[in-house]
Amino acid sequence: MKADVRLNQRGYRCPMPVVAIARAAREANSGTVIAVACTDQGAASDIPAWCEMKGVDFLGSETEADGAVTYFVRTR
């Protein structure tokens, strides 16, 4: 999936992937797609929950060749 901003949070544990997305979302214009690559398994529930709480669109995820999962969100 195409993203306007890509973040690499491989190796970081909760809550760092969500903190990174929150920081990027604060600086982004409405409609910006942010991708964050994570190895933390908790991100599978943390990121969609954060999106719901903050009114950000959760667009889905993709598993990378290295086993990381990239999550895609869109700011409103």
Image (tube, rainbow, N blue to C red):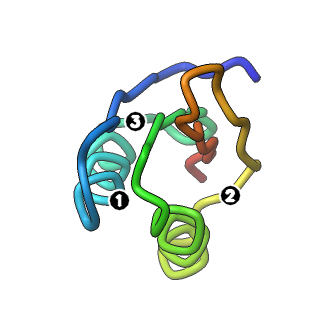
Q: Secondary structure at mark 3?
A: loop
Crowding at label 1, few (<14), some or many (≥20) Cα neighbours within 10 Å? many
Q: Earlier in the sequence, mark 1 or mark 3?
A: 1
The answer to whether marks 2 and 1 mark residues whose Cβ atoms lie closer than 8 Å is no
Image disc number at residue 28 = 3
Q: Position of residue 22 (x, y in %)?
A: 32, 55
Q: Position of residue 67 (x, y in %)?
A: 58, 33
Location of residue 49 with respect to 15 vertically, above or below: below
Q: Earlier in the sequence, mark 3 or mark 2?
A: 3
Q: Position of residue 26 (x, y in %)?
A: 31, 49
Give me the residue at 32% from left, 37% from top.
9
Crowding at label 2, few (<14), some or many (≥20) Cα neighbours within 10 Å? some
Q: Which residue is mark 1?
A: 18
**Dot in front, 3 or 2:** 2
Q: Earlier in the sequence, mark 2 or mark 1?
A: 1
Image disc number at residue 57 = 2
12 to the left or right of 75: left
Give me the residue at 51% from left, 81% from top.
53
Crowding at label 3, few (<14), some or many (≥20) Cα neighbours within 10 Å? some
Q: Amino acid at mark 1?
A: Val
Q: Position of residue 8 (x, y in %)?
A: 35, 28
**Dot in front, 2 or 1:** 1
Q: Amino acid at mark 2?
A: Asp
Q: Secondary structure at mark 2?
A: strand
Q: Amino acid at mark 3?
A: Ala
Nearer-the-camera pick, 62 or 52: 62
Q: Secondary structure at mark 1?
A: helix
Give the alpha-carbon distance from disc 3 to disc 2, as whole Å. Answer: 14 Å
